[in-house]
Image (cartoon, rainbow, N blue to C red):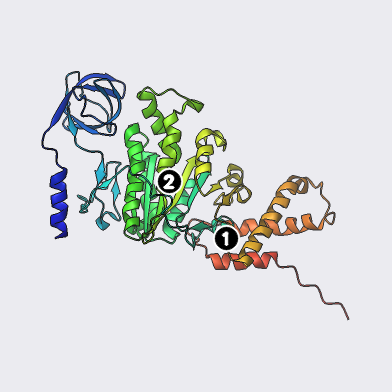
Amino acid sequence: MTQLIGLANAVRALSPDRRFGTVVAVRGALIEVTGLAGTARIGARLVIHGAGDHPIQAEVTGLDRDIAHCLPFSDPVGIASGTRAELIAGEGRIRVCDGWLGRTVDGLGRAIDGKGVLPLGLVPRAVKAPPPPAASRARVGGRLATGVRALDLFAPLCSGQRLGLFSGSGVGKSVLLSMLARWTECDVAVIGLIGERGREVQEFIEDELGPAGLARSMIVVATSDEPALMRRQAAWTTLAIAEHFRDQGRQVLCLMDSVTRFAMAQREIGLASGEPPATKGYTPTVFAELPRLLERAGPGLPGQGAITGLFTVLVDGDDHNEPVADAVRGILDGHVVLSRRIAERGRYPAIDILKSISRTLPDCLPPLFNAARVEARRLLATYGEMEEMVRLGAYKSGASAEVDAAVAIAPQIEALIGQGKDDRGDPAAAFAALAALLAPAEPAEAAP
C-alpha cells in the first residue's frame, strides 16, 4: 500500500506538457535562455541538449524580462546559440534510503563510487529546504563523547549542537574530522566534502575514515574543479540527507568541509548573476545563504532525532576575523580554533584551548568536571602569559605561586590533550587524569 501511495504521488507530480526554450548566449559560465517567460522560476531545472553525448543540467539563477539566466552543473561543452533547453518541472529532489549508507555521491545525489546504482527511497525530498520552525524545535540534548580529549575536556559537543572548526590550511583539519567521524556517538554520519582536492577524497575515505567509519556514513563530494553550482548543491544535498535520517528519529553527525568553499561557490554564482560585490568580493546572497544552510542542522521537532553539525571554516591567511569566519561564528553554537603555532610545535590535534568555546557550557558538564575545566583553563592562560619569560629565563621560580603552579602543570595538560589519529580518548578517563594533575600535592611528612 505504501508503494502504491508513493507511485500515485509521483504520477500526480508529473507535468502534463513539456516546455522548451532556446539558448541565445553563453557568457563564461552563464547561459541565457529565452522562450520560457512565465514558466521558468528561480531554482527551476533545465536540461540543455548540446552537441555532447550527455545533456547538461542547469539551474535558473536569475530572470531578466524574457531571458532566464542559468548556470550549469557541469562544463557547458557543446552548447551553441540556438541549442534547445527543456524545462523540468520542480526543483532538485533526492530519494534517500538506508541503502545509501556506505556510499559516495555527487551534489545531485548520483553514485560516484563505482558500487552500482543507488537504491531509491519512496518519498522524494527537496534538496533545499527550510529548517524546522524555531518555536517548535526540541532543545539541544546531552553531551556526546567525541573521543578527542581536547574537545571532551574544554569544548564539549552536545546532541543537536552546531560547532565550527576554524583553521588555516595544513593544520590537521582533515585528520581531526576523520577522528570525529569515527568516534563521535551517533547513528549515522553524513560527510560533505565541498570544494575538496580531488586526490584527497580517496585518501580520506580509505585511510582516514576506514571501513568501520564508512559503514555508518554517507559521503557527498564536489571537488574544487567542479562548477560553482555543483559545489553549492553538494552542501545542500549533505544537509538534505542528514534531514532524512533525522526525521527517522536517528542521531545524525553532519560534517562539512568546508563552509568557506560553499561561500566561495555562492560568490561565483552571485557575481555571474550580476550581483554587486561587497566585503572582500563576497556578494550579499553569501551572507543570506549561510544561515539558511547552517540553521538546517540542530535538533528536530519533538519525537525526531537531531543533527549535530561540525562545520569547518578555512580562514583566509589565518585571519580569524575575515568576513565568512566572522559570519559563521555568529551563527554557530561554538567555535574550535586550530592553531598553526601549536601544530608547528608538534601537538595534535592543534586545538587552541584558550580561543575555543562551546556555548553549551557550563550546563552540559557536572559541577566537578566544570570546576576542573575552569581551573585548567586558568593555568593555561597564566602559562601563556608567562611562557616567553620562562623560556628566556627572566622569571625566577618562587616569585609567584600561581605562575609556579602553571609552569609545573600546563605542560602536563598539553601532553594530556595531545593524541594520535588512532588514540581514542574516553571522557571519564580524561577528566580523571585532569583532576589528578590539578590535585594539590600531598604535604611531606615531618622528619622524626
Locate the C terminus and report the quarter of the image it occupies: bottom right
Q: Along the polypeptide, which appears first: circle 2 or circle 1?
A: 2
Along the horizontal axis of the image, is 273 left or right of 175?
left
Amino acid type at circle 2 is: Glu
Q: Is residue 71 visible?
A: yes
Along the horizontal axis of the image, is 109 left or right of 368?
left
Q: Is residue 172 visible?
A: no
Q: What element carries label 1?
A: loop
Residue nearest the viewer, comparing 336 with 46: 46
Q: Give the answer, above or below, for where 35 lies relative to 165.
A: above
| Residues packed near mark 2 inside 10 Å, few (<14), some (14 to 19) or many (20 plus) | some
Along the horizontal axis of the image, is 331 left or right of 123?
right
Q: Position of residue 40 (x, y in %)?
A: 23, 29
Residue nearest the viewer, comparing 308 with 285: 285
Amino acid type at circle 1 is: Asp
Residue nearest the viewer, comparing 333 with 324: 333
Looking at this view, name the residue that lies furthest to the front.
135
Along the horizontal axis of the image, is 223 left or right of 329?
left
In percent of the image, x 63 and y 67: which residue is there? 368
Q: Position of residue 293 (x, y in %)?
A: 40, 42
Q: Position of residue 71 (x, y in %)?
A: 29, 28
Question: Residue tagged by mark 1?
Answer: 363
Looking at this view, name the residue that lies furthest to the right.
448
Question: Residue tagged by mark 2?
Answer: 295
